[in-house]
């Protein structure tokens, strides 16, 4: 992909900065060196597996502080006659799913 090592290094730094703003500062980002015969390099996979096996997951503070709804299914309970007569009428809906952090 990159012809010069300096260009690859610059791209990695930009990706790391973006990743840190999206997740959290100091989050570990692994760069897999490449592929041989359709598989990742053994040493890269070993390093990644070793890191994953010894880390303890951090609690996501934003998710704990902000309640949210995960809807599996939405049903419209508005009578069909009301919708047929006025398409912009107020609707009555039912949400089925999960509520977290309430």
Image: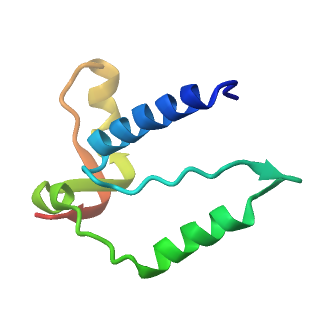
Quadrant for the N terminus, please: top right
Residue 90 x %, y %: 18, 29
Residue 93 x %, y %: 26, 45
Residue 41 x %, y %: 74, 60
**Is residue 81 shown left or right of residue 92?**
right
**Image height of 42 relative to 84, above or below:** below
- The colour scheme of the drawn protein is rainbow
Which one is in front, 72 or 67?
A: 67
**Is residue 59 shown left or right of residue 101?**
right
**Image height of 34 relative to 52, above or below:** above
What residue do we see at 55% from left, 28% from top? 6
Residue 78 x %, y %: 27, 39
Which one is in front, 99 or 38?
A: 38
What residue do we see at 16% from left, 60% from top? 61
State the residue lying farthest toward the bottom. 54
**Image height of 14 relative to 26, above or below:** above
Quadrant for the C terminus, please: bottom left
What residue do we see at 37% from left, 42% from top? 19
């Amino acid at each position: 992909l990159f012809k010069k090592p300096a260009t690859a290094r610059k791209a990695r730094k930009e990706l790391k900065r973006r990743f840190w703003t999206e997740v959290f500062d100091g989050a570990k980002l692994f760069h897999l060196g490449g592929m041989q015969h359709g598989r990742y390099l053994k040493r890269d996979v070993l390093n990644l597996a070793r890191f994953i096996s010894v880390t303890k997951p951090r609690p996501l503070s934003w998710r704990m502080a902000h309640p949210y709804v995960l809807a599996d299914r939405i049903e419209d309970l508005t009578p069909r006659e009301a919708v047929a007569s006025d398409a912009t009428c107020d609707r009555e809906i039912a949400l089925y799913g999960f509520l977290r952090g309430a």
